[in-house]
Image: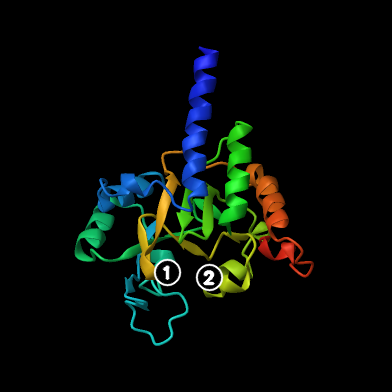
Amino acid sequence: MGAEHGDSARSGLGRFTRWLRSGRGPKESLTDVDRESLLLAAAAAGLPLAPAAHPVDYRCSCNRIGCPTPGRHPVSFAWQTQSTTDRGQIERWARHQPQANFITATGMVHDVLDVPVEAGREALERLLSAGVDVGPVALSGGDRMLFFTATRGTPEDEDEWWPCELDCHPETMDEHPGMRWHCRGSYVLVPPARLPGDRTVDWLRGPEHPLPDPLTLLEPLTDACARHAGADQDYDYESAWPR
């Protein structure tokens, strides 16, 4: 039994590694899965959702001239209070807005550790090989990986709040090439989502995986980000930490 389990684990990791090294997630499975079902699965796992803009060619459906994050931002300014896991509401949104992406508001139930894909590949293989319980993981646009974790953003003592200025302003994402910690006041796109240029946001590990404590993933992710930053001595690794 032990040998069979080991062979199975190595085989699964091998398929997973091939997906990662190709720069794509297992998109072949997405073509057969209903978008609404994926959104409902995310909500059932406790991820609060709200409608987001979607790409129109290389523009954004919001029609804002020079939109800094086309297809990546919520539709409503009230997205934090609008976000919900209510099945009926999500079904209505999905059916009435068939092109819409969806965001999930972080810092309520979950946080997201957002890293460059090269660092994410390395850290994920290391974590899985070590038998660490990794939660949901998404591939975003082919250049970022999103590690979904339990939140550290809603402590009983408000003095221990971890709002991060970086994550309160997702439009500044291109200014921070290392790791970003999305916590209270931030959001990420939830799969399935479309980005300009035929890029997508897809699950590599779905929301059926329990959310881990972010601190169990933090060291491998920060180590991998540091290695992949290369010779850039000016990079400020402290910028990713919640303030």
What residue do we see at 45% from left, 61% from top? Answer: 141
Of 98 and 199, nearer the camera is 199
Horizontal side of residue 53 vs 139, given as left or right: left
Relative to 190, does residue 235 appear above or below in the rendering?
below
Instruction: Name the amino acid type tagged 1.
Output: Arg
Percent across and percent down for residue 37 are 27, 47
Horizontal side of residue 37 vs 184, given as left or right: left
What residue do we see at 38% from left, 54% from top? Answer: 191
Can residue 128 be seen by looking at this rendering?
A: yes
Percent across and percent down for residue 71 are 38, 71
Dot 2 or dot 1: first in sequence order is 1
SS under mark 1 = loop
Circle 2 crowding by C-alpha within 10 Å: few under 14, some 14–19, many from 20:
some
Circle 1 crowding by C-alpha within 10 Å: few under 14, some 14–19, many from 20:
many
Disc 1: which residue: 72
Total marks in image? 2
Relative to 127, does residue 119 appear above or below in the rendering?
below
- The quadrant the C terminus occupies is bottom right
Label placed on residue 170: 2
Percent across and percent down for residue 203 are 42, 49
Residue 164 falls in which quadrant of the image?
A: bottom right
Give the Cα distance between marks 2 and 1.
9 Å
Relative to 220, does residue 11 appear above or below in the rendering?
above
Horizontal side of residue 89 vs 137, given as left or right: left
SS under mark 2 = helix
Instruction: Name the amino acid type tagged 2.
Output: Pro
What residue do we see at 64% from left, 32% from top? Answer: 130
Can residue 136 be seen by looking at this rendering?
A: no
Asked if marks 2 and 1 touch (Cβ < 8 Å), the reply is yes
